[in-house]
Image: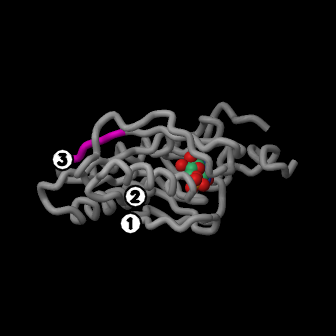
Amino acid sequence: MTASANPHDDIATVLITEEAIAARVRELGAEIHAAYPAGEAIVLVSVLKGSLVFVADLMRAIPRNVEIDLMEVSSYGGGSTESSGKVRILKDLSGSIEGRNVVIVEDIIDTGLTLSYLTTYLEGRNPRSVRIATLLNKPARRLVDIPVTWTGFEIPDEFVVGYGLDFGEHYRNLRYVGVLKRELYASIIGEI
Ligand code: IMP
């Protein structure tokens, strides 16, 4: 089965509405602001492409100066819905994070392998601190323990899309987070 012309038609259920996301992002912005003394620099490191929408809203919910940097990573060796744990950096930071408070902004933590690699990588660049803010957390599939400071929503073990998250580069522009109809990816995970 291939993607429909209208992305809404491929969604089985809406898991988190646009309104619920907006309310939670406002809370997270306030919490991040309160966590650091005034005057200390904060750099949001957005992990592309999935956290693009989240970071755009989150940065505007933080009532102080923040810097933004972008990294793009891909895990390779796994299928489209499975993480392999081997991470390749497609785009590195463009600025220094030395002495700064880094908040890694992720769309979703699944096995935790991507963030485990990324945290170690960024800590090697001598920041003042490294913390993680993720929109979604799927604790059921965690393979490595990751200390997550800010979580938007804990979700069940479903493959979700929307608000930046994709399947085959589609669905990122949905304004909500929804569960993808299983028949769209079942052939890839070997069910049909
Ligand atoms: P991890 O290394 O297994 O934690 O994988 C994290 C990455 O896998 C995320 O940044 C997403 O790109 C992708 N991912 C994991 N679960 C989902 C999902 O349900 N929908 C879309 N992408 C997902």
- Dot 2 or dot 1: first in sequence order is 2
Task: Give the residue number, with chain letter if any, for mark 2.
Answer: 133
Q: CA distance from mark 3 to mark 2?
A: 17 Å
Q: Which residue is mark 1?
A: 149
Can residue 21 be seen here? The reply is: yes
Is 75 in front, or is 136? 75
Alpha carbon distance from label 2 to label 1? 6 Å
Give yes or no for contact between labels 3 and 1 (Cβ–Cβ under 8 Å): no
Relative to 141, residue 52 above or below: above
Q: What distance separates the C-alpha of mark 3 from that of mark 1?
A: 20 Å
Q: Residue at image x 51%, y 38%?
A: 89
Q: Residues within 10 Å of mark 3 (few under 14, many from 20)?
A: some
Q: Quadrant of the N terminus?
A: top right
SS category of the residue bearing label 2: strand
Q: Which residue is mark 3?
A: 65
* Residue 122 screen position, x and y as percent: 39, 50
